[in-house]
Amino acid sequence: MTKRKATIIIPVFNEEGNIIAIVERLNKIFENLPGIEFIIIFVDDGSTDQSLPILMSLSEKNPTIFYLSLSKNFGKDNALMAGINFSDSDAVITIDADLQHPPELIPELINWWEQGYDVVYAYRKDRNIHASFFTRIRSQLFYYIINKLSDVKLENGISDFKLMDKRVIEVINKLPEDKPFLRGIIKWVGFKQMPIEYEPDERNSGSTKYDFNTLISLATHGLTSFSTKPLSFAIYLGFFFSALSLFYVPYVLLSFYFHWDRGPGWASVIVTIAFFGGLQLMIMGIIGLYLGKTFIQGKGRPRYIIQTSNLNFKNK
Ligand code: UDP
Ligand code: MG
């Protein structure tokens, strides 16, 4: 029987201190899984440190290590997509480079896969987590809102550490979406899915690549990728305030008629203008987010551009 093949995909954005460490950890795991042929694809997402030279020399010495280098930083999801597009194995496992996703869980992922699951994904236990209080609250709020608004249910703390079978990969390869929100999409595709818990480790070296602004834009992107409910929220809000004004207008008319209020009345005017002005801007913003997405999508630009790779000639 031929061995089944699995590809490990590792997105790398300035991870020079982690590459050798994760390869060593992974090799130990591979030794204990002799039934499967593993290869590793590192996707260099426009690193500006020594990551790419390290990857190049590593892959020269090791026939099962490949790299794909993008022409600039395209973001983690696009980097993962690049790796997924170039894999041709029976399963793909995506894992962070910084060793926060313990590679020791890979046998468990493989085990569920061998039992017939198409997607095995890890979500974070909330106990003992290596994150600040505010990071935790922020992430819980994100999952709370996304679960309320969208049809796809995401576990709190669901990660990009997961295994996907070839048939899931085939579906994902056909999706034309720009900046795919993979955590959501992979749940959305369906098939047989198995969640497993993991406890994140501390980052091995370097620091997180996400600052507060990036996180906010990722969160709005995640939300608007998976739901159009914010648009109907705008309609409800509109109805609510129109209904309110039905009471307010008679009051204004009556007070005019009975001379209840002879003052110039600018305060109430300003308050009303400010309030409704804000409301309208907010709703236009929501609509704008969606419009912006169709604009970007309409241009049909590639999700990523590859500047160099050793994949093609090594595979053939
Ligand atoms: N990453 C990437 N492109 C980016 C940002 C991050 O490829 O634009 C990679 C990064 O190198 C790491 C993984 O995505 O392998 C997770 O990033 P990080 O550890 O900074 O995220 P956190 O664990 O803090 O959420
Ligand atoms: Mg990390």
Image (spheres, grey):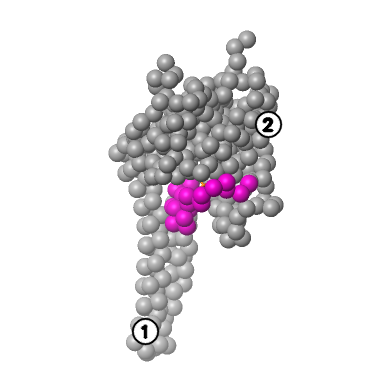
Pointer 2 residue: 108
Question: Which residue is rendered at x = 40% and y = 58% of the image?
Answer: 283
Separation of residues labelled 2 and 1 (CA atoms): 70 Å
Pointer 1 residue: 265
Q: How many marks?
A: 2
Q: Residues within 10 Å of mark 1 (few under 14, many from 20)?
A: few
**Horizontal arrangement in the rendering, residue 98 relative to residue 123 (left or right):** left
Circle nearer the viewer, 2 or 1? 2
Question: Which residue is rendered at x = 41% and y = 64% of the image?
Answer: 279
Quadrant of res 304:
top left
Up/down of 2 relative to 196, above or below:
above
Which secondary structure lies at badge 2? helix
Q: Inspect the image, locate mark 2, and give the three-letter code of the amino acid beneath it.
A: Glu
- Give residue 6's position: percent from left, percent from top: 56, 24
Q: Residues within 10 Å of mark 2 (few under 14, many from 20)?
A: few
Quadrant of res 164:
top right
Question: Which residue is rendered at x = 37% and y = 68% of the image?
Answer: 277
Which secondary structure lies at badge 1? loop
Viewer-proximal residue, 266 or 293? Answer: 293
Inspect the magenta stretch and tell me whether residue 49 lies in it: no
Up/down of 303 relative to 279, above or below:
above
Residue extent of the magenta highlight? 201-223
Q: Inspect the image, locate mark 1, and give the three-letter code of the amino acid beneath it.
A: Gly
Viewer-proximal residue, 39 or 18? Answer: 18
Viewer-proximal residue, 314 or 116? Answer: 314
Question: Which residue is rendered at x = 66% and y = 42% of the image?
Answer: 198
Q: Quadrant of the N terminus?
A: top right
**Horizontal arrangement in the rendering, residue 70 relative to residue 200 (left or right):** left
Inspect the magenta stretch and tell me whether residue 210 lies in it: yes
- Residue 219 shows in the view: no
- Residue 24 shows in the view: yes
